[in-house]
Image (cartoon, coloured by chain):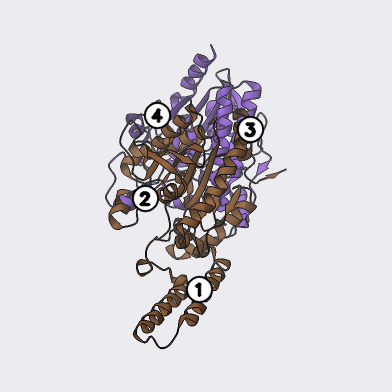
């Protein structure tokens, strides 16, 4: 987690920043003038911070949730793996083209269980952001993910996917190598994987890029994430012909965990630490770990055939129409 | 054939700047069961069609005679499900399936217009049930179920109805042991159905695994354009995947790619010839030969 002085704050997080700044000021003047005791004032401010965070979380608009999901201090896939698992061995490459750094994966120990854990990875500074291509995988990323899933299936290990992508990369080479085919293949193969599969949206869940590693027995979202067919910005540009309607688009798309759960399109929403996962990496990872371990055990009670059948029928029910 | 195209507007439910949405000069009087070709497609006299590619002008009936392929430059005009069914099915006879499933504005989605209003207007304008129509008929005597998209219906967008119709078509094909074909013509997902439209990718893929297990052949034909959600699912999952000449096929639209990489796209990028070259199509088929090649393929699968 970044130190306080390196923290980044979103616009609507400014009240929190102000409070932290005030505390800093008080601490400084305390050091200069030891006669006055400011500890109670500081304590009071710290309490206010908690209250403010709580209040903010309760009143988040859909667009603010989108912003939180992209918070520059937010933990990414490798951070969750580091905090939740032991003995992670990263496996690289799709055995065809190259190793896609926007998609990571490997075996790891989660509790008492060996799992295959796969996810999109973003960077946290200019250099690594570029190296990770902002979490936008190319076809080889999806094919690497599929290779690892097949490996897990072969050795009967549960699969966890951590989804955090603004979309599959819309590039020239990506098209040449069949971005559409790679995602289609993953979706098709994932629906009949014999091992338990749990997919977690930990940040951005944008369209096919997310679904390409997003077909599972359980699909769940962290509290401050979004998942839908298009980013609010692109939706605004296409449907409203302007980039300025992203807030409206975010509302209309009903992309939050609460909405998705209500529609039956995801199976659970997992809470985050107060104010968002970016305030407490250990806390966020712990909540997720405590969700995953029993969920895997529950899924293991079923036969592979049962799991596949239920997966197909779960997705099969999604949609709405009128029937005359 | 250089043609800058942006089908975003079609996805937004407008006619857009696309070269043409569909060649539609005739309207079906009555839909559904066993509509015979000769009863309905006398093109009105004196109508002319201009090829968007080479500007060659000919009469509609000449174009129709030529399966809507430009007699001069072989440009494949965009056509709809009615025309494809006429081209493919013997004597133009077929049975439409699942025609009673209609789109619904479950989310009360409002962009520049409410989705339900957009649907109403589209129904009034197009005379088709949704962006996909499923039909069972015979192709040179071979049974085939064809699910064909209509670009004029909100850009052939992939929504709940398309997902449900394809799913039911798979069940039908498994039950009747009839091969299945999808004719893709879509700009991508139906954004007004939000995540529900995205989930159709998983829904239809699940059904296709069942179709595959039942050893029922599934053929995917990609026509101009085939993009987004369709490409990222059933369009790229055929036992045999073919394309019409010159069709634009891809995941991300050309405009988005251009904006991302900030340079011009090479000539022929994302055309079927390009996909064939990169190994994503089994073959390219001229519409005039489609029916015969298809029935030959079906015979090979069957015998």
Quarter that holds the N terminus of chain B: top left
Q: Nearer the viewer, mark 4 or mark 1?
A: 1
Would you place residue A143 above or below residue B11 in this image? above
Q: CA distance from mark 2 to mark 3?
A: 46 Å
Q: Residue at x 52, y 15 (%)?
A: B299
Q: Nearer the viewer, residue A27 or B61?
A: A27
Residue carrying label 1: A49
Considering every residue shown, the one lying at the far front of the view is A35
According to the picture, the residue beneath numbered tag 3 turns out to be A302
The front one of B132 and A69 is A69
Q: Is residue B294 above or below residue A266?
A: above
Q: Which chain is purple?
A: B
Label 4 element class: loop
Chain A: give its colour.
brown
Task: Give the camera-side residue of A296 and A161.
Answer: A296
Q: Is residue A104 visible?
A: yes
Q: Which disc, if any, is residue B281? A: 4
Between the residue at mark 4 and the residue at mark 2, the CA separation in whole angstroms equals 23 Å
Residue contact at pointers 1 and 2, CB within 8 angstroms: no
- Nearest-to-viewer mark from 2 and 3: 3
| Chain that bears disc 2 | B
Q: Chain of mark 1?
A: A
* Pick the front one: B266 or A13: A13
Check whether the beta carbons of the residues at disc 2 and disc 3 lie within 8 A of each other. no
Residue at which label 2 appears: B255
Q: Identify whether A243 is placed above or below B231.
A: below
- Separation (CA) of disc 4 from disc 1: 58 Å
């Amino acid at each position: 987690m970044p130190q306080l002085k390196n923290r980044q704050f979103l616009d609507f997080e400014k009240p929190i920043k102000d409070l932290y700044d005030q505390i800093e000021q008080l601490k400084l003047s305390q050091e200069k003038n030891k006669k006055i005791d400011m500890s109670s004032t500081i304590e009071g401010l710290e309490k206010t911070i908690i209250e403010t965070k709580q209040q903010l979380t309760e009143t988040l608009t859909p667009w603010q949730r989108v912003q939180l999901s992209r918070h520059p201090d937010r933990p990414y896939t490798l951070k969750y793996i580091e905090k939740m698992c032991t003995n992670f061995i990263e496996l690289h490459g799709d055995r065809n083209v190259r190793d896609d750094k926007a998609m990571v994966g490997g075996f790891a120990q989660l509790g008492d269980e060996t799992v295959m854990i796969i996810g999109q990875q973003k960077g946290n500074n200019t250099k690594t952001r570029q190296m990770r291509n902002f979490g936008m995988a190319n076809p080889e990323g999806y094919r690497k993910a599929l290779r690892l899933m097949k490996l897990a299936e072969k050795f009967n290990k549960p699969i966890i996917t951590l989804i955090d992508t603004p979309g599959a990369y819309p590039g020239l080479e990506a098209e040449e190598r069949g971005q559409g085919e790679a995602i289609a293949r993953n979706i098709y193969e994932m629906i009949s994987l014999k091992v338990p599969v749990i997919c977690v949206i930990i940040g951005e869940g944008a369209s096919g890029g997310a679904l390409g590693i997003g077909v599972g027995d359980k699909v769940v979202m962290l509290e401050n994430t979004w998942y839908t067919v298009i980013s609010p910005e692109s939706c605004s540009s296409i449907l409203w012909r302007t980039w300025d309607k992203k807030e409206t688009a975010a509302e209309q798309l009903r992309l939050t965990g609460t909405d998705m759960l209500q529609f039956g399109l995801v199976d659970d929403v997992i809470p985050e630490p107060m104010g968002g996962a970016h305030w407490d990496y250990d806390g966020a990872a712990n909540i997720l770990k405590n969700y995953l371990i029993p969920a895997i055990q529950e899924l293991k009670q079923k036969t592979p055939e049962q799991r596949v059948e239920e997966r197909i029928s779960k997705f099969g029910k999604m949609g709405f129409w009128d029937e005359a | 054939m250089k043609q800058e195209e942006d089908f975003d507007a079609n996805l937004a439910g407008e006619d857009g700047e696309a070269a043409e949405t569909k060649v539609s000069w005739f309207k079906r009087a009555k839909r559904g069961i066993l509509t015979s070709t000769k009863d309905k497609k006398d093109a009105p006299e004196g109508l002319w069609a201009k090829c968007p590619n080479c500007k060659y002008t000919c009469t509609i009936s000449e174009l129709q005679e030529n399966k809507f392929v430009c007699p001069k430059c072989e440009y494949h005009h965009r056509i709809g499900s009615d025309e494809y069914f006429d081209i493919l099915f013997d004597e133009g006879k077929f049975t439409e399936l699942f025609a009673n499933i209609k789109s619904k504005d479950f989310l009360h989605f409002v962009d520049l217009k409410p989705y339900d209003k957009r649907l109403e207007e589209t129904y009034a304008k197009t005379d088709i049930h949704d962006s996909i129509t499923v039909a069972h008929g015979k192709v040179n005597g071979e049974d085939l179920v064809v699910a064909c998209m209509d670009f004029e219906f909100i850009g052939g967008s992939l929504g709940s109805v398309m997902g449900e119709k394809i799913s039911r078509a798979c069940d039908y094909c498994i039950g009747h042991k009839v091969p299945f074909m999808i004719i893709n013509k879509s700009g991508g997902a139906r954004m007004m159905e939000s995540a529900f439209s995205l989930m159709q990718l998983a829904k239809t893929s699940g059904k296709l695994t069942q179709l595959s297990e039942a050893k029922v052949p599934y053929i995917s034909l990609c026509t101009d354009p085939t993009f987004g959600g369709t490409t990222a699912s059933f369009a790229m999952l055929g036992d045999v995947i073919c394309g019409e000449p010159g069709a634009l096929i891809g995941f991300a639209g050309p405009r988005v790619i251009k904006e991302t990489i900030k340079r011009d796209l090479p000539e022929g990028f994302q055309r079927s010839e390009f996909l064939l070259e990169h190994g994503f199509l089994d073959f390219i088929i001229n519409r005039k030969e489609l029916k015969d090649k298809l029935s030959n393929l079906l015979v090979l699968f069957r015998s």
